[in-house]
Image (spheres, rainbow, N blue to C red):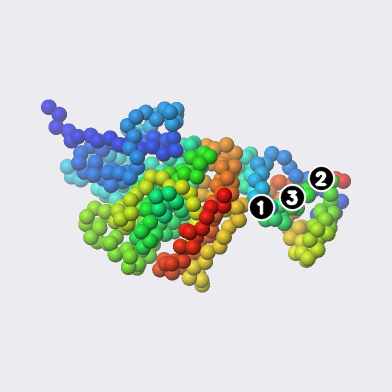
Amino acid sequence: MSHNTEKKPLRKPGYHLEMMDGELLMFSPEEAQILYCNQTASLIWQLCDGERTAQEIVEMLIAAFPEAEERIWAEAPATLEKFRQHGVIEFVDG
Amino acid sequence: MDDAPPLQHRRIALGGVAIDVSARGARAASLVDFLLRYMASRSAPLSEETGEAPPLHYHLAFDDRGVATLCRDGALIYTGESRGAVAELLLGEIGRHLAAHARAGPMFHAAAVALDRERGVLLPGLIGAGKTTLAAWLLASQGLSYLTDELVLVPHDTLTMRGFSRPLNVKLGGWEALRRHRALAVADTDAEASGAILSYDGGRLIAPSALTSAPIRTTARLHLILFPHYAPDAEAEMEVRPLSKAQASLRLMACLVNARNLPDHGVAEVARLARRVPAYELRYAELDKLAGRLEPLFAQKSRV
């Protein structure tokens, strides 16, 4: 994991959300920016509640989708980093 | 005694935006008619539809030497001898004004055609995606009806498409692609001589009647969304890829031209359309390869 495993990702408020068949569009009215999340990314974003560490989020996803463990390990850190770069989450102390 | 050529007026309206175009003399009136004859003409005030600013006004005239002048709200914006150039400029001005001010619903940078009296196909795309070329091909080879090649309004809470119906503005690359297609033989020099095609430096303005005998339609129900992508160097001759609702929404947002005029920048309206209308990406290398391949898409049912 590229982030401090003790840090906990937290969704930022203020986004217009459109959930469609498990995929998610997040629109920031302030920045007029829109972000598309496939089903995996959408799940990750929903788990960013400031209570779980990034490591715990990955472990939850793997527990739910063990057949996709390899892909989750590959995609989850990149997805969290993408969220951070777009400003839709922040990392808070546990 | 006033010897001035007669003045003709035309008011067009779309999405709660009105534009007046006046033409001094027969030559100017003929050109304005060529450009705007397919748009519903309104003479009554638009207060019930807009309640907004008074219409923008354009004035076109030609002098005895054939020099055109085009003014916007009294300010000269063109003078020159090219009918094609002034026509292309006027259409571009109108399109930009509609996009900037429409509030009656999401307005997309898109072409649109009608499959029959009710069902329509939206062809959204950024500049260069090939939407005009594809629309022209669908008219000429499939006999579909024309709505627009540039702007489509979908009024709030409806699935109705309203198009900025104008001559198709086919850029030079698209023109060459179309001329290679035998179904478009009609759109050739004969049509140009008859006034159905007007050339300008960057392409051709083509009256839809030069491409299809099907009636021009002002509205159609949104039945299918196709995102065209003309890729002449692609390995595959043609590829159709279904888009998820979120993917379709994202692409529609990229083609939404009046987002700043809509609540939440139109995201909710766009998502509503994507939830109800199937959407596909259409990549193609040659127009001829599309023949017989799009009917299954046209025949499918809406999502709800």
Q: Within the image, what quadrant is residue B137 found in? A: bottom left
Mark-to-mark CA distance, 3 and 1 = 15 Å
Crowd around label 3: few <14 · some 14–19 · many ≥20 (10 Å)? many
Crowd around label 2: few <14 · some 14–19 · many ≥20 (10 Å)? some
Horizontal and vertical percent position of residue B14: 41, 39
Q: Nearer the viewer, mark 1 or mark 2?
A: 1
Residue at mark 2 shares a chain with residue at mark 3: yes
Taking the image as shown, residue B234 lies to the left or right of residue B197, namely right
Q: Within the image, what quadrant is residue A2 found in? A: bottom right
Horizontal and vertical percent position of residue B64: 17, 42
Disc assigned to residue A45: 3
Tag 2 residue: A50
Where disc 2 sits, the SS reads: loop
Taking the image as shown, residue B208 lies to the left or right of residue B113, namely left
The mark nearer the N terminus, 2 or 3, is 3
Kindly identify the amino acid type of the residue bearing the numbered disc 2.
Answer: Gly
| Residue drawn at (76%, 57%) of the image | A77
